[in-house]
Image (cartoon, rainbow, N blue to C red):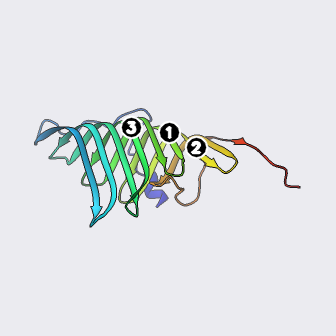
Amino acid sequence: MIAGAAALLSGLSCGEQPGDYSSDTGKIQTVSGFRLTQAEGAERSWSLQGDTAIYLEEDSLVTLTGVFITFFKDNLPESTVSSDSGRANLTSGRTVLWGSVVAENTSGRILETQLLEWDDSLGVFHTDCLAVFTVPEADGVTVLRGMGVTLDTGLGTVGDVQVHESFQAVYSGEVTDLD
């Protein structure tokens, strides 16, 4: 699964938004207050919202501003992601978010980056950009900072944790002597 998640970023650079698609052909719909929810029966998986959305019908693409996604586990919110902008491919289930991306789960874990991809079929987030991951613990907080991370939508690790480059971990809190 990690190899598949690492292949998500198809040539995008950090801070770079995805390229244009065939906006000259097909039907284009502009929506204010966009909302799309994925559910099986009464169980919600996720809900995607945007302040504004442009839907390119021929490409099954939605480009959003003011993006907010809620992920559900057992029909209860598990985590949220917000970003300045995003583009969702409704056919492939691949969403790219850019500009002040912040993901937070109900346990207080926070991921901050400038470019984040979410693959619905794999259930993972991935970025090759600078990422800051804050993990609250019983006696303090651990802040992990580095280039590239792959996490599940609940902000848990996927497989083995791999350090790519420029990795730094800082723990703040009370360190007790184990004598």
| Mark pair 1, 2: CA separation | 9 Å
Q: Which residue is mark 1?
A: 112
Q: Residue at x 54, y 47 (%)?
A: 108
Q: Residue at x 40, y 46 (%)?
A: 117
Q: Which residue is mark 3?
A: 83
Above or below, 119 against 32 in this view is: below
Above or below, 84 against 125 in this view is: above
Q: Residue at x 15, y 47 (%)?
A: 58
Residue at disc 3, secondary structure: strand
Tell me, yes or no, whether the two marked residues, 1 and 2, touch with CB atoms within 8 Å: yes
Q: Which residue is mark 2?
A: 134
Left or right of residue 97, residue 33 in this image:
left
- Closer to the camera in the image, 98 or 70: 70
Mark 3 closeness class: few <14, some 14–19, many ≥20 residues within 10 Å: many
Instruction: Specify the amino acid type for callout 1.
Output: Glu
Instruction: Specify the amino acid type for callout 3.
Output: Ser
Q: Position of residue 39 (x, y in %)?
A: 29, 61
